[in-house]
Amino acid sequence: MLSVSKPVAFVMGSLLSASSLAAATSTQQRHVGPPCELRIVASIDGQDELFINPREARVEHHHWGMPAFVSINGQSWHPRENVRHSASKESPFFADTLDLAGGTATLIEGRGQIAFRHEGDDLVLTFDDGPHGGADEYVVLVEFADVQCDRSLVVDDVEPSQPSPRELLIRARIDGRDELHLGPHRADWLHLKWSWPTDVRIGDTAWNPRDGAARLRTHHPSR
């Protein structure tokens, strides 16, 4: 069982690849269609597992009291009456085209622990309320790798002005969680949580990843 502070993110599966980041654009687009993130609210007293796929959610109860209620993006039900809840055809829980292998679950509220994995078409969120008496309300935000890619800023077509160095000095002021993906001619910054980085330098080049229109370009020296 993974322990958490409030809030903290778990990375599920492999990290995003450079090829997946290459498909991201530097301009965020408004999402239309099924939700690409899940906000889950649940009353937990003991240990429970929540299984979610685009069409259905169900609770497997293990210890102490059955959850009094569960809400997924505003769709609520009472597991004490029915452990299963079906999403409507018009409002699936999430898009069935999303890649489940690179998501994160962030515990926003809750005094215990959570764990996050996927099994086939299901996301599985485990709640462990620990030895505390009574129930506590848990709020969890689940985000998917595809959405994180869409939120990344890509800087490409960077041509070196000097022969490729054997060492590369990278400096940045980080507040939260970020990933930097480097290739010979491009750098991709993926911002995951908290504040955007500042004072970023890759070698001698300054970069502001938060600027959605930013593209760093250098040129080959004259020959």
Image (spheres, rainbow, N blue to C red):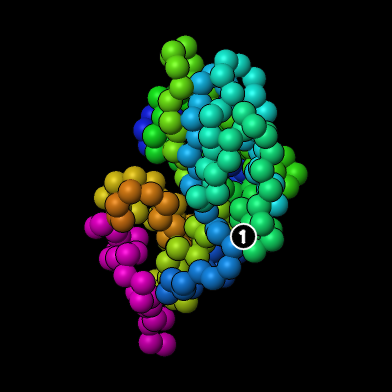
Residue 186 visible in the shown view? no
The residue drawn where x is 67% and y is 34% is 82
What amino acid does circle 1 point to?
Ser
> Is residue 218 rendered magenta in the image?
yes
Q: Quadrant of the C terminus?
A: bottom left
Residue 202 visible in the shown view? yes
Q: Secondary structure at mark 1?
A: loop
Percent of width and height locating residue 205: 30, 67
Q: Is residue 196 above or below residue 43?
A: below
Q: Which residues lie in the magenta part?
A: 198-223
Q: Is residue 175 left or right of residue 152?
A: left
Looking at the image, the residue that sits furthest to the left is 199
Percent of width and height locating residue 151: 45, 63
> Is residue 134 rendered magenta in the image?
no
Q: Quadrant of the N terminus?
A: top right
Q: Which residue is mark 1?
A: 91
Percent of width and height locating residue 162: 39, 71
Percent of width and height locating residue 115: 56, 31
Q: Is residue 120 left or right of residue 41?
A: right
145 or 138: nearer the viewer? 138
9 or 169: nearer the viewer? 9
